[in-house]
Image (cartoon, rainbow, N blue to C red):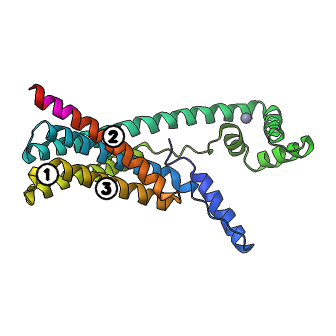
């Protein structure tokens, strides 16, 4: 739905950039990085927050490190599978919708070519092009690639369905696994160095550090303000851990 759409768009951008290079005029944009970055960060973020919160909740209820490692491993596998399934279904249905829309558009172009030309011209008029020129633009665009022009300007998609459900599922699950592994490794290290007395502080502080580093890296790669990204992700992470710790405490008191 996100990571894969826009393949044609990037080929186009590369071509435009080559032309601009020869003109010594170039501005770099990071928006084409945003879709895969968003998916990867979301997956890893999910992995850290959900696994760390779960571990802290179970630890607050009084479980020791052997149980926590079991819980962490189960959380990692369950979360990764859930991410894969969710992403697969979501990207597949996005691809179905795109395919159906393109089929409709293709039929319209075959049966009502002139009306479609007017439609495209109207879209350009809506963007501020004069009626005269908009007709020329529509004419030339449709001579070049009618379906591509309508897909882009009318539907806002590229003319080839490029959504790849399997790839999206695998990359989301991988990102989640990498994120979820961090708090599990933290539990291993806490057990190894016999720091069980300070289990919850160590686990929550290390998880918040992982989250902050992830937020900072993502912001750096995406060219966004680093401080805002770090504050945002640590706030939500801390909130999740506080809530599950509270629930764990309640269970320990109640049972
Ligand atoms: Zn159309």
Tell me whether the residue at label 1 lies in contact with that at label 2, contact meaning CB atoms closer than 8 angstroms: no
Q: Which residue is mark 2?
A: 239
Q: Is residue 82 left or right of residue 188?
A: right
36 lies above or below 67: below
The nearer-to-camera label among 3 and 1 is 1
Q: Counting other residues with Cα less than 10 Å from the Cα at mark 2, is it few (<14), some (14-19), or many (20 or more)?
A: some
Q: Which residue is mark 1?
A: 198
The C terminus appears in which quarter of the rendering? top left
Magenta stretch containing residue 1, yes or no?
no
Q: CA distance from mark 3 to mark 2?
A: 15 Å
Q: Which residue is mark 3?
A: 210
Q: Which residue lies most toward the top here?
A: 254
Q: Position of residue 132 (x, y in %)?
A: 92, 43
Asked if the residue at label 1 sits under 8 Å from ligand 1, the reply is no
The magenta stretch spans which residues?
247-251
The nearer-to-camera label among 3 and 2 is 2
Query: Which is more N-terminal, label 2 or label 1?
Result: 1
Q: Residue at x 37, y 42 (%)?
A: 236
The one nearer the camera, 118 or 69, is 69
Q: Is residue 129 left or right of residue 174?
A: right
Q: Position of residue 89 (x, y in %)?
A: 41, 34
The one nearer the camera, 78 or 41, is 41
Q: Position of residue 85 (x, y in %)?
A: 34, 37
């Amino acid at each position: 739905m996100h990571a894969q759409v826009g393949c044609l768009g990037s080929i186009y951008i590369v071509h435009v950039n080559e032309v601009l290079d020869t003109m010594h005029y170039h501005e770099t944009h990071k928006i084409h990085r945003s879709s895969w970055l968003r998916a990867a960060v979301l997956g890893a973020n999910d992995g850290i927050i959900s696994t760390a919160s779960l571990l802290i909740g179970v630890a607050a209820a009084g479980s020791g490190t052997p149980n926590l490692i079991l819980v962490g491993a189960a959380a990692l596998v369950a979360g990764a599978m859930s991410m894969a399934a969710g992403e697969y279904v979501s990207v597949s249905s996005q691809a179905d919708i795109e395919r159906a829309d393109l089929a409709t558009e293709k039929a319209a172009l075959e049966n009502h070519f002139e009306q479609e030309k007017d439609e495209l011209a109207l879209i350009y008029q809506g963007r501020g092009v004069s009626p005269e020129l908009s007709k020329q633009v529509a004419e030339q665009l449709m001579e070049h690639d009618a379906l591509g022009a309508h897909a882009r300007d009318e539907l806002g998609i590229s003319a080839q369905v490029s959504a790849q459900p399997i790839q999206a599922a695998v990359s989301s699950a991988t990102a989640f696994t990498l994120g979820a592994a961090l708090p599990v490794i933290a539990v291993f290290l806490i057990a190894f160095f016999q720091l069980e007395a300070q289990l919850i502080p160590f686990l929550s502080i290390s998880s918040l550090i992982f989250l902050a580093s992830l937020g900072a890296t993502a912001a750096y790669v995406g060219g966004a303000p680093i401080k805002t990204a770090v504050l945002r992700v640590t706030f939500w992470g801390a909130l999740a851990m506080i809530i599950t710790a509270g629930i764990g405490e309640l269970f320990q008191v109640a049972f």
